[in-house]
Image (tube, grey):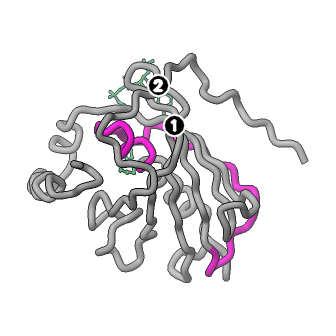
């Protein structure tokens, strides 16, 4: 079976300037927000993605599929898998650029079914930048770092001003988050 994958990145890009204070390879990256559906530790049915800084512009994330994440009986819901990739790609951008950015476009190829109880090992990689546009992609390996690829994703993140969150989100929660972030070594080494 053939699958046509579009050219990636779709425009001419520059290398992404990784922030000099980006966490070192091997650093475990805590949840960026405890109530985040993707990585938060206060969301009982969340994805609880756990990420670690990798080498060469990569972030490695793990997501274990539970019964709360089913679509068909015993299998992960496709939209949830896309959410896990959104989070993994967002971590790849956020921790390396240390600038606020949001998903503008996310495309996902589903190559294999992902059973409940399995773990996806997701490797996100920065592919380049054009102005405020950051191109990032990821492969998700089933049950081992070198397991078969079950999903592939590509995304465009757009760098935004902090006002994106204060204008459209919850101002008070953002102020609290910003105060607690000051104490985070992975965000403020
Ligand atoms: C550590 C953190 C982990 C976080 C992980 C989770 C990440 C998320 O889920 S974020 C939440 C989901 N995303 C959102 O809510 C974003 C909603 N969208 C928006 O706010 C806006 O549309 C936004 C900010 C993306 C772009 O708006 P704006 O800032 O006005 O910029 P705009 O001029 O429209 O776009 C900037 C560039 O991106 C391009 N672009 C934007 N969206 C797209 C798209 N869907 N497809 C292709 N190109 C796009 C534009 O064409 C433009 O290109 P150019 O500079 O060449 O003209």
User: Residue, x 24% and y 55% (percent of image)?
Assistant: 185
Q: Measured from the top left, where is residue 127 in percent x and y?
A: 55, 32
Q: Measured from the top left, where is residue 125 in percent x and y?
A: 55, 42
As drawn, is 59 to the left or to the right of 34? right
Q: Is 93 situated above or below 182?
A: above
Give whichever of 29, 2 is nearer the camera.
Answer: 29
Q: Can residue 87 be seen in this view?
A: no
Give whichever of 2, 18 is nearer the camera.
Answer: 18
Circles 2 and 1: CB distance less than 8 Å?
A: yes
Q: Mark 1 points at which residue?
A: 126
Q: Can residue 169 be seen in this view?
A: yes
Question: Is ligand 1 within 8 Å of the beta carbon of the residue shown at mark 2?
Answer: no
The residue furthest right is 1
Q: Mark 2 points at which residue?
A: 129
As drawn, is 125 to the left or to the right of 2? left
The residue furthest top is 12
As drawn, is 71 to the left or to the right of 1? left
User: Residue, x 41% and y 77% (percent of image)?
Assistant: 45
Q: Measured from the top left, where is residue 24 in percent x and y?
A: 39, 48
Distance (Cα) linking label 2 and label 1: 8 Å
Q: Measured from the top left, where is residue 110 in percent x and y?
A: 70, 55
Q: Residues within 10 Å of mark 2 (few under 14, many from 20)?
A: many
**Start and end of the magenta stretch?**
91-118
Within the magenta stretch, is there residue 103? yes
User: Residue, x 41% and y 72% (percent of image)?
Assistant: 46
């Amino acid at each position: 079976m053939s699958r046509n994958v579009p050219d990636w990145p779709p425009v001419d890009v520059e290398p992404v300037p990784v922030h000099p204070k980006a966490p070192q390879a091997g650093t475990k990256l805590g949840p960026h927000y405890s109530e985040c559906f993707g990585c938060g530790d206060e969301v009982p049915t969340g994805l609880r993605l756990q990420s670690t800084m990798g080498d060469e512009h990569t972030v490695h994330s793990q997501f274990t599929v539970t019964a709360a994440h089913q679509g068909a009986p015993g299998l992960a819901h496709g939209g949830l898998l896309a959410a896990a990739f959104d989070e993994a790609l967002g971590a790849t951008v956020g921790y390396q650029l240390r600038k606020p950015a949001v998903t503008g476009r996310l495309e996902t190829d589903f190559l294999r079914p992902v059973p409940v109880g399995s773990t996806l090992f997701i490797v996100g990689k920065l592919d380049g930048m054009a102005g405020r546009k950051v191109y990032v992609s990821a492969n998700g390996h089933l049950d081992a770092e070198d397991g078969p690829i079950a999903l592939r994703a590509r995304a465009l993140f757009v760098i935004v001003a902090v006002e994106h969150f204060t204008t459209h989100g919850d101002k008070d929660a953002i102020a609290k988050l910003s105060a607690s972030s000051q104490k985070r070594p992975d965000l403020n080494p």
